[in-house]
Image (cartoon, rainbow, N blue to C red):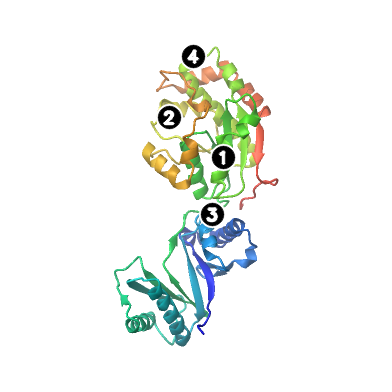
Amino acid sequence: MAEKYERHVLVHFGELWLRGNNRGAHIAMVRRNIASQLGIEQKQIRQEYDKLLIPAGKNPEKITSRLQNVIGISNFSIAQSTKSDMKSITKLAESALRELKKNGVPKFRIEASRIYKHPDFTSQDITNMAIKLATKMKIEPDIHAKENTIFFKVYRERTFVYYGKANGINGLPVGSSGIGIVMFSGGIDSPVAAWYAMRRGVIPIYVHLHGFADNKAAEKSKVQKIVEVLSKYYPRYKVYYIPAHIFQLALTKVDNRYEPILLKAMLLRISEKIAKKEGAGAIFTGESLGQVASQTMANLAASQQGVALPILRPLIGMEKQEIIAAARRIGTYDLSILPYKDVCSITARNTVTNSSVEKVGKLLEEMKIDKVVDRSLKAASIVENAPSKPKPRK
């Protein structure tokens, strides 16, 4: 009867190892996020040196499919383990090679490393042993077969053997950089900006300006569905739905060539007020320099006047095709291109491309923008999937 080996899912980190004194806190946050994604208790996930160990159970593929959405992971593998002595490692290598042959893998590569420098054998000893076994089984080792690699990782108590690695998203665990307000439309760009913010450790709170007759209609729109797609990367979310009619009424006597710039200015001020309430440290937008008339350098400067909070633009240097490719990759594109009454797209023709801070400031005064912001916030509704406020690491 063949020996049964303990199976685990091994999770490795990338950038987290550069975190210095914050490394432990960041890894603990990844561990919490993994537990949340898998629906298990944190104590089931064990840290050993440079990896996390998750019991594989009867369906390890279900675990690995969910790990693909956890930000902060470099790579992961389904592994078997045995004692860290040469006899036990040889038996496990023989079992792994037999499985490769059964699956019809023609060539393979061996990569052996000792996290613990075992005094009784070297990494080369493991490699030589595996080559000898493979030759005996008539399997051909090939140092160039990078896609088909068997990994041997030796630790003090256990040695792990696994075949191949699946790449993770990398980045910083969501929550490690605090909370950010995301100005969120029904289009392609802002969901991608939200995802990049999450990838740098930000918990997003979404602010959406809508053109529906009431908030309930907006809450049932594609915007909510896009937020739910993004929630697979971090399950908590909060969305502020803000009606646009108060802003539109204030525009009636204003030169409509400035409409998109004034709209952005109002949204930034609304976002800053929400940020103070939610304890957010920055505002994120989906703007890309020069992509549309409102996103020239002059117009960006004019629209952000009076806002003290940092305004971060993850897409600022990206071309539209790059943003579309990212939207497809994260799963928001198909929803983003559905027809939608997007207030951000209801803009006048011949938009001013080189507005001045002074001119826009004067127009905002004429609109009584502070009152518009306050009235719009009072008319807002909130949708969230958790009753408690997200608590990022301080």
* Dot 4 amino acid type: Asp
The residue that label 1 is drawn on is: 225
> How far across and how far down the image is residue 311, in percent?
51, 37
Q: Which mark is residue 255?
A: 4
Check the image and report above or below for 388 versus 16.
above
* Dot 1 amino acid type: Lys
Q: Earlier in the sequence, mark 1 or mark 4?
A: 1
| Residue 309 visible here | no
Q: Which mark is residue 279?
A: none
Q: Residues within 10 Å of mark 2 (few under 14, many from 20)?
A: many
Q: Which mark is residue 173?
A: 3
Q: Earlier in the sequence, mark 1 or mark 3?
A: 3
The residue that label 2 is drawn on is: 295
> How far across and how far down the image is residue 295, in percent?
42, 29
Local SS, label 1: helix
Q: Earlier in the sequence, mark 4 or mark 2?
A: 4
